[in-house]
Image (cartoon, grey):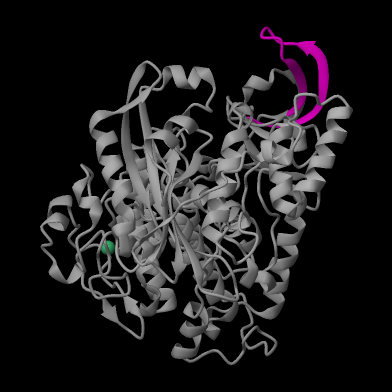
Amino acid sequence: MTLSEHMNDSDSDSSSSTCDIAPSSPRLIEGQQDGSVQDSCADVSCIHPDADSDIDVWDLVDGRQILSSSDSEVEGEASLTEDLVQWMNRHDIKRTAADDLLKLLKGHGHTSLPSSARTLLKTDRMVVSEEKSGMNYIYLGLGNTLVKNFDKYPDEIKQTTKILHIALNVDGLPLFHSSNTVLWPVLCSILIQPITVFPIAITCGKSKPENLDFLHDTVEELSQILQNGLQFGETNMQVTLKSIVCDAPARAMVKGMKQYSGYFGCDKCTQKGLWLGRMTFPEIENFTCRTDQSFRDQENAEHHQTVSPFVSLPIDMVRAFPVDYMHQACLGVMRRVILLWVRGKKKHKLSASHVQEINTKLLALQQSIPACFARKPRGFDEIERWKATEYRQFLLYTGKIVLKGILRNDLFAHFMSLSVAMCILVSPTLVQHHSQYAHSLLVYFVRQGRELYGPEFLVYNVHSLLHIADDAVECGGLDRCSGFAFENYLQVMKKMVRCGKNPLTQVVKRIHELDSVSATSELAKPKYTVSVNRPNNTFILDDVSCCEVVAESNERDDDGSKKILCRVYNTLEPAFMEPCDSRLIGVYKTSLENSRIKLLSPKYLDRRAIMTKKSNGKETLFLAILHDL
Ligand SMILES: [Zn+2]
C-alpha cells in the first residue's frame, strides 16, 4: 500500500488541521511510480554480504542490546565553586592538591572560596545504607529534594508556578565492564524548562533488585505529597505525577507485568503476540486498549506477574507509563531500520557505494550542526557506536537530507512517514494540532514496514509506535515523557563512581557535595546565547522567517539588549511535499536572492535551526530544531 492509499483509507483528521500549512493531499513521491530500484545490491563489497537468510538477517539486526545509550548534553556556566567540585570529582584530585590550589586562588583575589577541600566539598563523613530487594539501598527522600531543586529556579518561575508537574524514572545503570555491579536509582524530574533531574533513592548490587521493595519509600512519600501537596515557603503547592518513564524491561518490572517479549507483553493493548523467531504484534488497528481499571483488576491475567507498588497511587496505571521514544523509537526503531539498510536482505540493502555516499553527506553536515547538539553526525560505518542522541538527530533532521535520492524511493517514503510523525510528536506546539495526522503516518509506517521488510518487522518497539501519539498528547510532547533527561543524569551519576569499592557510598557523597554548592546559575541562564559564527548563528524568527546572525551592533532595543545584524530569508518554499508540505515541521527551502540584511532585537529569535547550503551555493535549507534543548 502506498502512503497515498493509506491516507485515503485512514481516519486521519489532517483536514481539520488548524495550521495554515496542512498536510498535502497524499500522492506518490516523484519517481516512485516506476518502482525503480536505485541500489545495486549485487555489490559484493556490501557490509555483511552473506546475510540474506531470514534468521541471519534478523539476528544481525536484533542481536544486540544497548545498555548505555546517550551522552550527557548538559551544558551551562556554573559558579567557580561548583566548577572546582566537578573538576575535583572528574579528575580524582587529591585533597592536598586541591588545598594548595585553593590557597593559590584565594591569594589571587578569589577570597570567597573556602580554605580547604573538605569545606569545599562538604562531604558527609558517614553514609549509611540498608539492605532492600537483595541490594544495598539508600533513601534520599522526595519532599526535601523536590523543595531544594525547585528552589533553584528563577524567582519569576517560583512565583508563578501553581502546580508542580513531576516525572519519575527507574532504570538500571551498569557501572563496570568487568563486573555485573549495577545501580538502580529512582530519579525524579521537575517538568519546568530546563528540566531538573535528581535522585530520590539509589539501590546498588548485582544484576537487578530481586523484588519491588526498593520502591516502597518512594511510593509512600509520593502518595502523601500527591494528596497533601508540598510546603514551599509560605505556599502549599499541588504536585502531580505526569509519568513514570522507563525502558521496556524496567517498565515491565516496576509494573509487575510480563516482559514485552511475552505473548501479552504490550502494556497498552491486549493483543496476543505472534512468535516468528521473535515476538511480533501483527494487529495494526483492531486491538483493545488496556485501561486503568482493567489493569488494576488484572483482567488479562497473562499480562501480570505481581502487584506493582504504584497501584496505591492515584494515577492511571496505563497512561502514566508512556512509551519512551528514546529507547523505543530512537534506539529501537530507527537503529533497526538503519541496520536493515546496511546489513538486511538484498532487496532492501544499500550498496557499499550508496552507504559511502550517505557517510560522505553525513560528515559534510558536521559543519552545519549547532553546538546545542551533543554530537556531530557520524557515518553508518560507525553505527555500532551511535548514541541515542545521534539516532534522534538522524530521525528528526539529518536523515531527510542525506537519504534523499540515494535510498530507494519506497523505503525513503517509508522513512519519511516516521520522521515527520516524530517531528510532530516531539514538538509541544505541533503535537497540539497534528497528533492525529502523526498517528496516521505511524499506522502507515507500521503497516508498510510489514510489506517492505516482512512480518518480523513488527516487534514490540515498532508496534509501540501505534500507542506513542496518545502519550505525546497526554504529556504535551515526547520530550516531556522521554528518557533523554534521565539518561543525561545517569551518565553524570556513572562518572561519580571512581573505583569498585562501595560505589553506592561514593555516589551519595558526590551527590551531597554537588548539592551543597549547586547554584541557580544554570537554571537562570538564557535559553541560548547568540553567536555570529556558523553553525551557531541560525534561527527561525517568530514571524516564521529564517535568519543568520551576521554581526553585533551597538544599537540597543527598548529593553536595553543589543540589536543584532541578521540576514533574513523571507520567501520560504517547501523542501519536500511528501508526506506533507515540509513547512509544517519547520523545514524550509530558500536562497540568497530571497534574503536581506536587517537590524533585529534578539527577542525575535524564536528557535534555533540547522542551516545547510547546497554545493552550488544557490539553495539554502533551514530545519527548525523541534526537540527540547
Ligand atoms: Zn499494543
Main secondary-structure element of the magenta-colored stretch? strand
Q: Residue at 74% x, 35% y: name it.
A: 537
The residue nearer to you, when weighing 213 against 46, is 213
In the image, which residues are magenta?
545-567
Magenta run includes residue 551: yes
Ligand 1 appears in which quadrant? bottom left
Q: Residue at 59% x, 65% y: name it.
A: 501
**Image quadrant where residue 194 sits:** top right
- Name the image quarter holding the C terminus: top right
Report whether residue 446 is seen.
no
Q: Residue at 37% x, 15% y: name it.
A: 234
Q: Residue at 66% x, 84% y: name it.
A: 46
x, y percent for residue 244: 35, 49
**527 up-or-down from 121: above or below:** above
x, y percent for residue 67: 52, 68
x, y percent for residue 391: 57, 60
Count of numbered marks? 0
